[in-house]
Amino acid sequence: MEVEKLVPAGAIVKFDVESWQQLISGKKQGLAAGGLRSILLVLSFGYGLVMIIRNWMYNAGMLRQHRVDVPVVVVGNLTVGGTGKTPVVEWIARYYRQLDCRVTLLSRGYQSSVGQNDEAMLLEANLVDVPHLQGRDRVALARTAIDELESELLLLDDGFQHRRLARNLDIVLIDVTRPFGYGYCLPRGMLREPISSLRRAGLVLLTRTDQIDIQQANVIEKRIKTIVPNCPVVWCRHAPLHLQNSEQERTAGELDGKRVAAFCGIGNAESFFQMLRSLNADMIATKTFPDHHNYTRTDVESLAAWSRQQPEGTWIITTQKDWVKLQCNELGNKPLWFLRIGIEVTRNQELLESSIQQAIGKADKDCPSSSFRSINPFLSFRKDAYDSANTQPV
């Protein structure tokens, strides 16, 4: 996986994400690897110090936070790479919509220089009644959402480090398969800011808790509690819903025992492949691209050739995030499917619900009943409200 990055001098270099992760995780050994880690450690201290000073300036009021007239809820990460944030944003947006709250999503729009990025395309497809504004100046976007769209709540996607816009609730996602970015800030580790920044969180959501041993997940939660003792910690998993393309839908259970070739360009590709294995799919081939990869004609031709190489009867599967950029139902004379994924809260759902209710000042009696949970574990809305909305599960 190679990503082009601009270095300060302006020269374009190739940055190999996989090699970098092998290096910072310690899997890559040797004198040269050790020397590189030492250099990255020095840079990491400098980066971490900058983030500490920046946060202190915001806390001290030296850098201004802009408040708006409606509640702001933030979903963000402490680390780079995929934590499974997009399905969580979708879950929360749906929850607020069931409260008859006019929600607008705000995001920077990473890699969206031409039109919408993949996350916006996915959320637009799944949340037809929730506007999504993208841009670097999220304070200006917030004002647009309020003044022009009459929004009653702003949901800020990937905004934990974006502190210019004041918020009512910070929800921080931690992927338990790689929770604390190998313990270091960028570039020695994957932390966007020091772990101590969790003190700003109003709620921590542990994702992919089904992909590690429960005792390991308990250790991660205990560590979080040493940093933020009173912060609610909620567990969830990313659960497969069904297979789909623009023409038809199939049950995810149909992959049981079937040969599957899968590809994706997301932050944590292995978690997607592991989900397919959990469906008892026979994974015969996988292919990965960089996160937020924009597929070119050459990429599509290469994928089609790769698909043709797979045995007859092989299922070609990708993520919805990738499919919305490809928009095709066939690759190499084989059907192309995306796996629709939802969020299932497995521990402390009541803490999640109470936190997001309190962010908008809603009393429990005004909020959706949890009785629908037994019918559809991915949502906790009233079934009559859900049916009348004529929407599909996350």
Image (cartoon, rainbow, N blue to C red):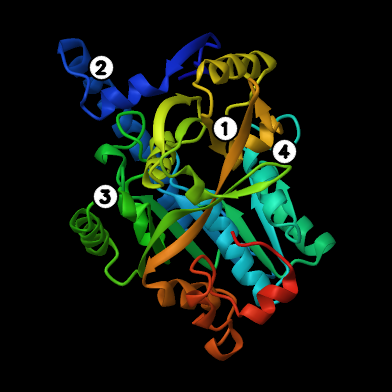
> Which numbered marker is on residue 67?
none
Q: Residue at x 62, y 60 (%)?
A: 155
SS for callout 3: loop
Mark 4–mark 1 distance (CA, rounded to whole Å): 11 Å
CB within 8 Å, label 2 to label 1: no
Closer to the camera in the image, 283 or 228:
283
- Crowding at dot 4, Cα within 10 Å, few <14 / some 14-19 / many 20+, comes out as some
Of all residues shown, which one is farthest toward the right?
Answer: 148
Task: Work out which quarter of the rendered image holds the N terminus and state it.
Answer: top left
Mark 3–mark 1 distance (CA, rounded to whole Å): 26 Å
Where, by quadrant of the figure, is residue 300 drawn? Answer: top right
In the picture, measured across the screen, residue 283 lies left or right of residue 304, that is left
Closer to the camera in the image, 310 or 148:
310
Q: How many marks?
A: 4
Looking at the image, tell me whether mark 3 or mark 2 is earlier in sequence order. 2
* Mark 3, residue position: 212
* Mark 1, residue position: 292
4 vs 3, front mark: 3
* Mark 4, residue position: 116
3 vs 2, front mark: 3
3 vs 1, front mark: 3
Where, by quadrant of the figure, is residue 26 drawn? Answer: top left
Which amino acid type corresponds to the residue marked 2 in the rendered image? Leu
> Which numbered marker is on residue 36?
2
Give coordinates of residue 148: x percent, y percent. Answer: 84, 60
Looking at the image, tell me whether mark 4 or mark 1 is earlier in sequence order. 4
CB within 8 Å, label 4 to label 1: no
Which amino acid type corresponds to the residue marked 1 in the rendered image? His
